[in-house]
């Protein structure tokens, strides 16, 4: 289970660094897709990912996209390692 969660986390972090600028429809579809996946996987991972996706889509307009995605990715990785080690 632990190694499975780690690989999921890694995939999400990779995805997180390539998140495109979403429109509202894509954003809603994203939430439907990932929050249904919550039922079978680690709740907190998807919850954080969803929030980060939302924040980054907002911050894109402020030209802080890269800074915030990098910061949140690092913060997530640190919290994840603290929790599971």
Image (spheres, rainbow, N blue to C red):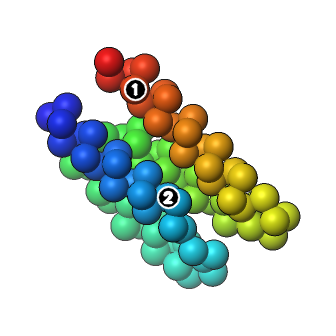
Numbered mark located on residue 81 in the image: 1
Q: Is residue 40 left or right of residue 84?
A: left
| Disc 1, SS | helix
10 Å neighbourhood of mark 1: few (<14), some, or many (≥20)?
few
In the rendered image, residue 71, in percent from the top left (x then y), is placed at 65, 43
39 or 45: nearer the viewer = 45
Quadrant placement of the N terminus: top left
Q: Is residue 3 left or right of residue 26?
A: left
| Observer able to see residue 35 | no
Q: Tag count in the figure? A: 2
For image coordinates 68% across by 59% down, the residue present is 66
37 or 72: nearer the viewer = 72
Give the mark nearest the N terminus, 1 or 2. 2
Residue carrying label 2: 16
20 lies above or below 13: below
28 lies above or below 80: below
In the rendered image, residue 36, in percent from the top left (x then y), is placed at 32, 59
In the rendered image, residue 50, in percent from the top left (x then y), is placed at 51, 54
| Observer able to see residue 32 | yes
Q: Is residue 75 left or right of residue 67?
A: left
In space, the residues marked 1 and 2 are separated at their CA atoms by 17 Å
In the rendered image, residue 52, in percent from the top left (x then y), is placed at 59, 51
Quadrant placement of the C terminus: top left
9 or 50: nearer the viewer = 9
10 Å neighbourhood of mark 2: few (<14), some, or many (≥20)?
some
């Amino acid at each position: 289970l632990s190694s499975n969660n780690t690989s999921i986390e890694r995939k999400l972090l990779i995805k997180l660094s390539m998140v495109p600028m979403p429109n509202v429809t894509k954003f809603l579809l994203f939430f439907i897709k990932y929050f249904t996946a919550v039922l079978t996987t680690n709740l907190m991972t998807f919850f954080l990912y969803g929030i980060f996706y939302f924040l980054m889509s907002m911050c894109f307009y402020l030209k802080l996209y890269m800074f915030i995605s990098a910061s949140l990715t690092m913060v997530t990785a640190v919290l994840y390692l603290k929790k599971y080690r």
